[in-house]
Amino acid sequence: AQKITQTQPGMFVQEKEAVTLDCTYDTSDQSYGLFWYKQPSSGEMIFLIYQGSYDEQNATEGRYSLNFQKARKSANLVISASQLGDSAMYFCAMREGRNRDDKIIFGKGTRLHILP
Amino acid sequence: EPEVTQTPSHQVTQMGQEVILRCVPISNHLYFYWYRQILGQKVEFLVSFYNNEISEKSEIFDDQFSVERPDGSNFTLKIRSTKLEDSAMYFCASSDGDTNTFPNYGYTFGSGTRLTVV
């Protein structure tokens, strides 16, 4: 079974509009962390935002916010006022458990296209 | 901002050749990882490494792969006899394991090495 599910393989959004990228996760651990990464065409993995399972407030970083709904096991990324430079692949990822060497598990990604 | 550094950024190698991908993790980090991303696909975990030992490895990480921390700063991934299907982007990552940063542990990715096997 998929641990991280991103149901939108691709999205097209008009510049300046807000974007929501969906992510649901599956874990039985109480302690886990959720990440969003941006991967432009150059290939590097750019960290955007992080949410810990015990964090009560939704994480925000500039134009990025994470809509964390723990009961629904959902961690959607919201990008406000999208820009052309936001066009990229976006990955939702999870690190579960308390072990210090636990790996990160990635979803399949959503390719976001911002239209001028 | 501390960085994980990977070299080279792009490597082309002949099928059957050995290749070594290099990473310099963040200096106070203790846990090291390699991931692989075949073009257009998701990022997959290969191996985690701590205290000079492999902590966990995936089914992808077969006998063709090995990892090493040859000195206090480098962390390497060796592929002994490359195959065409090893062509991918390889990401190194490190984390500090510090309880103050739990559960993120300061997890940081490098910018990747694009390996092309011809």
Image (cartoon, coloured by chain):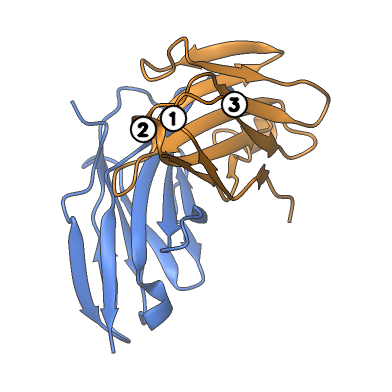
Report whether A11 appears left or right of B53. Answer: left
Q: Can you tell which quarter of the image residue A30 is in?
A: top left
**Considering depth in this image, is B15 or B74 the residue closer to the camera?**
B15
Tell which subunit mark 3 falls on: B
Residue A15 visible, this orientation: yes
Report the quarter where the N terminus of chain B lies.
bottom right
Instruction: Give the number of the mark in front: 3 or 2.
Output: 2
Give a yes or no on whether discs 1 and 3 share a subunit. yes
Report whether A40 appears left or right of A17. Answer: right
Any idea which chain is the orange one in this picture? B
Any idea which chain is the blue one in this picture? A
Is the Cβ of the residue at disc 3 closer than 8 Å to that at disc 2? Answer: no
Label 3, residues with CA under 10 Å away: few <14, some 14-19, many ≥20: many
Instruction: Give the number of the mark in front: 2 or 1.
Output: 1
Pointer 3: what residue?
B77
Q: Can you tell which quarter of the image residue B54 is in?
A: top right
**Considering depth in this image, is B59 or A103 the residue closer to the camera?**
B59
Pointer 2: what residue?
B84
Q: Which of marks 3 and 2 is nearer the N terminus?
A: 3
Q: Whole-percent x and y of residue B33?
A: 56, 28
Pointer 1: what residue?
B15
Is the Cβ of the residue at disc 2 closer than 8 Å to that at disc 1? Answer: yes
Q: Which of marks 2 and 1 is nearer the N terminus?
A: 1
Q: What element carries label 2?
A: helix
